[in-house]
Image: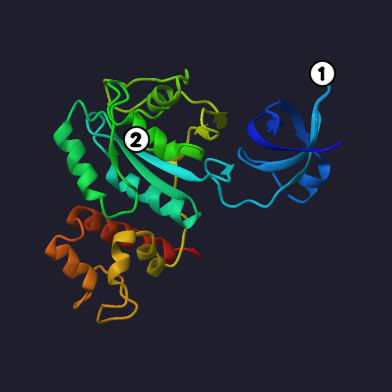
Amino acid sequence: MSLQGVILRGVGGFYYAMDQQGTVHTLRAQGKLRRERLKPKVGDHVELTPSAGEEHGWILAIQPRRNELTRPPVANIDVVCVVVAAATPEADLALADRLMVNARRAGIGVRMAVNKCDLNPGRAEEIVRQYRGADVSPIAVSAARGDGMDGLRAALAGKVHALAGQSGAGKSTLINALYGLNVETGGLSRKIERGRNTTRHCELIPVAGGGMVLDTPGFSLLETEVFDPVELKDSYPEFSPYEGQCYFQPCYHATEPKCAVRAAVAAGAIDSERHGRYVAMLEETRQRWRERYD
């Protein structure tokens, strides 16, 4: 008898999948999956034969994935919540933008949490303001004090979601505060003010409300895939109201004259700092596109 389940974790060739009744099974992948070069990922929906006693079960088939990422190797994520800090470490908003682009290109929804808002409320509000047009519903939160946590919890309820961002921004602390878990946290290295990465493997954790949270390393190391630079603008929702209004078609919204997006930036309708980071990412994307066959 086969069952349906979702992979929660994979370690050393063994996979741990939860079936629809909430039972977790220890599994190995059948040889035919290896021959088909199908490697199971955390988040995969699978057909399985259950484990029995000390005998492991088998993954028989992997259902088609709605989306997937290569690093970290996860699948079927509903939402990536990008986390930055209003205090130490200084928010790496270029990384936040890159994470948003990567998630959107993979077909994953995006939210944003500005943690440690209690330590620097002004900076938290400034970051929230920059992303108000980016379709990420930015929210200032404090895992330590509880500010904004009910709103963030409601936004993620019932979804398979991941918290992503630079080390030290408080992702594990947020997970613990949101769900009463005990995910290991590392604090900050005072010497270099970078977080110690304490998470050892990808794991989906079922939480109240029917959703699951992904505890994972690697998101802060994510690299955007190589793609045609003209597609970058499609991952910036604040540009979409102006598409088709520029003098040049297609328009990269960078240095072109008579660009409706640049006019919106000048008028304050689009945040100038976020647009500046977009122009920098566009140049990087162009460079990588030129070098793609080197």
Q: Position of residue 19 (x, y in %)?
A: 71, 33
Q: Residue at x 13, y 65 (%)?
A: 266
Q: List x then y, in percent, for residue 76.
A: 58, 46
Q: Earlier in the sequence, mark 2 or mark 1?
A: 1
Query: Residue 245 bears which disc, if any?
Result: none
Residue 82: where, in percent of width, then height? Answer: 37, 41
In 3D space, how far apart are the residues under numbered discs 2 and 1 (Cα atoms)?
A: 43 Å
Asked which secondary structure carries label 2, the reply is helix
Q: How many marks?
A: 2
Residue 111, placed above or below residue 282 = above
The answer, for residue 220, to whether it is visible in the render is no
Residue tagged 1? 54
Q: Which residue is mark 2?
A: 151
Amino acid type shown at disc 2: Gly
Classed neighbour count for the residue bearing mark 1: other residues with Cα under 10 Å, few (<14), some (14–19), many (≥20):
few
Q: Residue at x 17, y 32 (%)?
A: 121
In this picture, residue 158 sits left or right of residue 143: right
Which residue, as the protein is rendered here, is positioned at the far right?
1
Tell me what residue is drawn at x 41 percent, y 26 percent: 178
The quadrant in which residue 150 appears is: top left
Q: Is residue 167 left or right of residue 293?
A: left
Residue type at mark 1 is: Glu
Q: Is residue 276 above or below residue 26?
A: below
Of helix, strand and loop, which one carries label 1? loop
Q: Which quadrant does the N terminus fall into?
A: top right
The residue carrying pointer 2 sits among few (fewer than 14), some (14 to 19) or many (20 or more) residues within 10 Å by Cα, namely: few
Left or right: 286 in relation to 14: left
Q: Is residue 49 visible?
A: yes
Q: Position of residue 49 (x, y in %)?
A: 82, 34
Q: Nearer the viewer, mark 2 or mark 1?
A: 2
